[in-house]
Amino acid sequence: MPRPIPPGRCRTWTFPLSINLAGTLAGYDNDSFGMNHGVVRNRKGTITLLDAPNAATGDGGGTIANAINDAGQVTGYYLDGTYAHRAAHGFLWTP
């Protein structure tokens, strides 16, 4: 599920939603193709993208990381299916 940021990709925006006591942020970004990716950024600035295996890959699809606890576990949801027929599914990511 986690992967490094691909070189040369333009990020349209990044939106942090949660921070833990270690200073690690969780949130999401929307790339130049309109797809959402969960984001975890540690205190040193290292960024990891979280893409759920069954998340939709088109415009408005993808993975949203909502919260992170002090153990570094991230919760959120991903959207599957086509644009007109998407369903949300929760996930828990453990580093």
Image (spheres, helix red, strand yellow):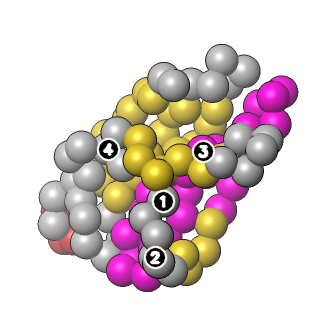
Work out which quarter of the rendered image holds the N terminus and state it. Answer: top left
Name the residue: 32% across, 44% down: 52
Name the residue: 25% across, 65% down: 57
For the residues carrying marks 2 and 4, which lies nearer the camera in this image?
2
Q: What residue type is labelled 4?
A: Ala
The numbered mark, 2 or 4, whose residue comes first in the sequence reads 2
C-alpha gap between disc 3 and disc 2: 17 Å
Crowd band around label 4 with a 10 angstrom C-alpha radius: few (<14), some (14–19), many (20+): many
Magenta region: 15-40
In the rendered view, would you say 74 is above or below 55?
above
The numbered mark, 4 or 1, whose residue comes first in the sequence reads 1
Name the residue: 25% across, 72% down: 58
> Label 2 near label 1: C-beta < 8 Å?
yes
C-alpha gap between disc 2 and disc 4: 19 Å
Crowd band around label 3 with a 10 angstrom C-alpha radius: few (<14), some (14–19), many (20+): many
Whether residue 7 sits left or right of residue 80 in the image: it is: right
C-alpha gap between disc 3 and disc 4: 14 Å
Find disc 1 in the rendering and name its residue: 5
Crowd band around label 1 with a 10 angstrom C-alpha radius: few (<14), some (14–19), many (20+): some
Q: Which amino acid does label 2 sit on?
A: Arg
> Label 4 near label 3: C-beta < 8 Å?
no
Q: Which amino acid does label 3 sit on?
A: Val
Find disc 3 in the rendering and name its residue: 40
